[in-house]
Amino acid sequence: MSIDLNADLGESYGAWTLGDDDAMLALVSSANVACGFHAGDPTTLLRTCRSAANAAVRIGAQVGYHDLAGFGRRFLDVSSTDLTADVIYQMGALDALAQVAGSAIAYVKPHGALYNAIVHHREQARAVVDAVLAYDPTLPVLGLPGSVFLEEADRAGLRTVTEAFADRGYTPQGTLVPRSEPGAVLSDPDAVAERVLTMITDGTALAVDGSRIDVAAESICLHGDSPGAVVMASAVSKLLRTNGIDVTAFV
């Protein structure tokens, strides 16, 4: 048995450092690298792509709203035309940096508020799908199971990859608890590791109300910007390997 572990990386900006990308790259199989719209300056992104290439970690374009001030975590009512162009721009920029680093983008994953919006916002979901189709229709897309984004992507012929979150709380409906609400972010490394193991072996997780929900995932996300992210990722990786589960990229 194997599972892909992914993490959001390349989110430092200029003199502002966020997370320990190199330590996370030693533990994950896929890196969701920022594209400059919600985080990441060109120098940081090139360095991250080089580090990912050296670690044989797949590079994914983490596309988001054009919102540096809000770290891409605020919904923007952007038009479909603008959103499609924004996503193409981000994919192209990161792909260029990845290729110079000896790699290339291998998949696309929306970030933050855009990720959450296109669980239900069909117009924006279609705009993101249109961007991937226009840039490279062979690129897989990561998203939340049951989202209209994955529905639209599948309908368009894109490869869809279902994702679960190791350190984020779930509602009874299977969506992520908003970060402004209690239980949104989990911090106990051992508890998170056990949770991930259950997700993989049982296909379920506990929601914030204590109910058990189905979780179908080909990839598990570990947030690189969370406090104690490296310790948490280490605990997850160790427990999986102890139980005979390999950490392997889905592409």
Image (tube, grey):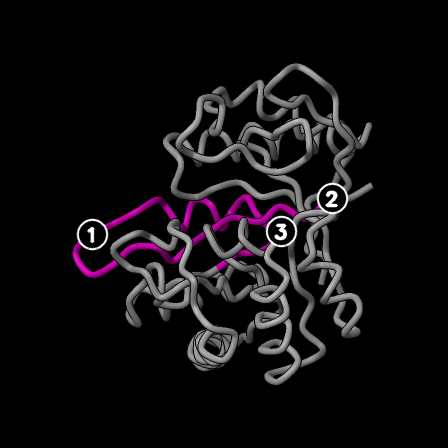
Q: Quadrant of residue 39?
A: bottom left
The quadrant of the picture occupied by the C terminus is bottom right
Residue at the outermost top position: 210
Q: What amino acid is at disc 2?
A: Ala
Which residue is at 65% across, 54% downward?
143
Where does the image place residue 125, in percent across and percent down from the top left?
Answer: 61, 64
Report how far apart the C-alphas of labels 1 and 3 lie in the structure. 31 Å
Q: Which mark is residue 16?
A: 1
- Is residue 124 placed above or below 24 in the rendered structure? below
Left or right: 87 as drawn, with respect to 226: right
Whether the magenta-drawn stretch holds residue 28 is answered as yes
Whether the magenta-drawn stretch holds residue 37 is answered as no
- Which one is in front in this view, the residue at disc 1 or the one at disc 3? 3
Q: Secondary structure at mark 1?
A: loop
Which residue is at 65% across, 22% downward?
194
Which residue is at 58% across, 25% downward?
192
Left or right: 145 as drawn, with respect to 113: right
Q: What amino acid is at disc 3?
A: Val
Left or right: 57 as drawn, with respect to 8: right
Q: What amino acid is at disc 1?
A: Trp
Where does the image place residue 15, in percent across and percent down from the top left?
Answer: 16, 56
Q: Which residues are magenta?
A: 3-32
Q: Which mark is residue 119?
A: 3
Q: Secondary structure at mark 3?
A: loop
Q: Disc 1 vs disc 2: Cβ atoms closer than 8 Å?
A: no
- Is residue 16 placed above or below 189 in the rendered structure? below
Q: Which mark is residue 217?
A: 2
Q: Secondary structure at mark 2?
A: loop
